[in-house]
Image (cartoon, rainbow, N blue to C red):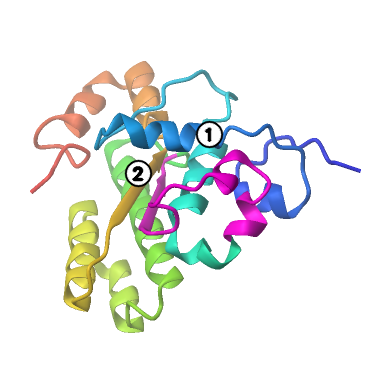
Amino acid sequence: MIRIPYGVSNFGKLINDGCYYVDRTHYIALLETLGEPYLFLVRPRRFGKSLFVSSLEHYYGLQHKDKFQQLFGKYHIGRHPTPLANSYLVLSLSFTSVDTGNTKTTYRDFLRNVQFGVRALMSNFSEWFDAASVRQIAQLDSPTAVIQHLLQAIKAKGEPAKLYVLIDEYDHFANELLAFDFSNFKNIVSRNGFVWNNS
């Protein structure tokens, strides 16, 4: 019996658990033909954005290469893979759980989410990153420092590597701030704010 999933946003779990999946994988190749370095998926809630982002992580992530046929074999992109399949280190970030009660908690949770994503990437590729480098993530006190640490660690490896960044729920906490604390929103996303900061 095929299960009808509800609230399952992890592509690998959905496929491995034998859940019903409407094949949207042909959009992956379509996105590649756009040639855009930055893509934004703007759709209503419960529209399947998180599941699609997860399918991109499984498709492009090097760590899923040995499971490609198992995950995608019976779907369009599995029968017509692109040259970029499973060729990236994938940094997957999600900002669903950010406490926007005040500036301190917003910063704390934003930083924790960035740390979690970077630590997950480094753990997925333990042959690339030593344990001390992974532990150091917890000591860094800014999102910018965490990302810079990751980029430096990749560069230090000395092997060519492509990084694919996926951000889910990028507007979740920002929408809460817009609705309930506009002054805090302006501070956080301004040129000097921690979301904008690209130093």
Q: Earlier in the sequence, mark 1 or mark 2?
A: 1
Left or right relative to 52: residue 104? left
Left or right relative to 165: residue 86? right
**Label 1 belongs to which residue?**
26
* Residue 110 at x, y percent in the picture: 33, 46
* Span colored in magenta: 68-95
Mark 2: secondary structure: helix
Of 181 and 74, nearer the camera is 74
Was residue 6 drawn as part of the magenta stretch in this picture?
no
Q: Is residue 36 above or below residue 109?
A: above
Specify the quadrant that holds the N terminus. top right
Hey, what amino acid is under mark 1?
A: His
**Label 2 belongs to which residue?**
105
Which residue in the rendered view is the most extreme toward the front? 80
Q: Residue at x 17, y 70 (%)?
A: 155
Of 79 and 11, nearer the camera is 79
Q: Residue at x 57, y 58 (%)?
A: 68
Left or right relative to 117: residue 6? right
Q: Is residue 25 visible?
A: yes
